[in-house]
Amino acid sequence: MTDPGTVLITGPTGSLGRVATLAMASRPAAARPDLLLVGRGSEKLAEVAAEARAAGATVHEICADLSRLADVRAAGAAARDLLASGAVRPLRGLVGNAGMWSADIRRATEDGYEVTFAVNYLAHAQLVGDLLGSFATPGRIVLLGSDTYRAGRLRQMMGVQPAKWRDPVTLAQPAPAGSKARISDAAVAYSTSKLAVLYYAHELQRRVGDGIGVSVFEPGWMPGTGLGRSAPAAFQALARGVQRLPGIPTPERSGRILASLVLDAEWAHLRDGAYVFVDKVDEQPAWAHDRDRERRLWDATAELLAKASV
């Protein structure tokens, strides 16, 4: 058995991330990783860290607001220090679990970027880039995706909109302050940020080689979770109703699968941004593999992150 080493997870306090964190912490000692929990400094972060320690895991909290790229860079530096000092075992897994859905695409981060794109995509690209040199092999990177990027008619009837790709520099810009805030635009922004994650995963695998497996996890639509906390009240009420329907994925099930993806042998073969829908590898449409878009995204991401670091 390969030593599980250390796993870093973002968003460990939300429903999905909390379940995944505690599922990893509760494993038998030989299969239990050390944990680096990256999230907003809060009582919730302290609570999940305490629960993971009580289960037997070595745990370090790293406080960061993922909407602030300076915080993300500091989180990466803190993780590198812990790894270099031997406070935790070698890094073998990174789970980019944190995400958000903002109802107002005019909202900008301190770095000047549209907040949904910044948190869902840019923050994780920054963190992964800062930690690639610290990975032991074999290693795994699991990023959170969403089938909203290819929303079909049924999803669109429920207010979900598919991605609309544009140049990444344009996607990173908030809507003009004087424009009207529309939920449909916010839905497009969320879906497009998740298409960016998928494109990035494909290009990332080309850059890191075979020693680190890159995959994308779609946990299934889990209405009523904290992801849509800024959505309109009517949408949140509808989501809570749908959540009670039989067969709807739950954080408890999907969180355990997320932990399995980054640790278990059955998923060790995943490469090339393989897309796992709940518990099965799912083929993506041809247009979700676009080398030109993926290369441009990689280059534009470097530009955007460099601009924010000045």
Image: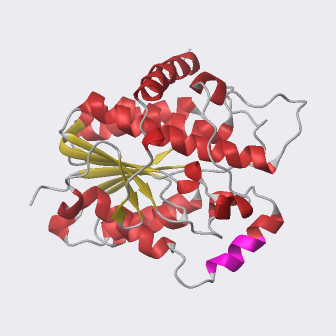
Q: Is residue 68 visible?
A: yes
Q: Is residue 140 above or below residue 117?
A: below
Q: Is residue 297 above or below residue 271?
A: above
The residue drawn where x is 91% and y is 30% is 178
Q: Is residue 175 above or below residue 31?
A: above
The residue drawn where x is 68% and y is 51% is 161
Position in image of residue 308 (x %, y %): 58, 21
Side of 269 relative to 297 (left or right): left
Position in image of residue 71 (x %, y %): 53, 34
Nearest to the observer: residue 173 or residue 274: 274
Q: Is residue 33 visible?
A: no
Q: Which residues are magenta?
A: 237-243
Q: Residue 59 sits in which quadrant? A: bottom left
Position in image of residue 22 (x %, y %): 38, 69
The residue drawn where x is 61% and y is 83% is 245
The residue drawn where x is 30% and y is 36% is 205
Q: Characterize the magenta stretch by its predominant secondary structure.
A: helix
Nearest to the observer: residue 134 or residue 54: 134
Side of 79 relative to 271 (left or right): right
Side of 218 relative to 120 (left or right): left
- The verdict on residue 126 being magenta is no
Position in image of residue 4 (x %, y %): 19, 56
Q: Quadrant of the C terminus?
A: top right
The extreme left residue here reads: 1
Q: How is the image coloured?
A: secondary structure
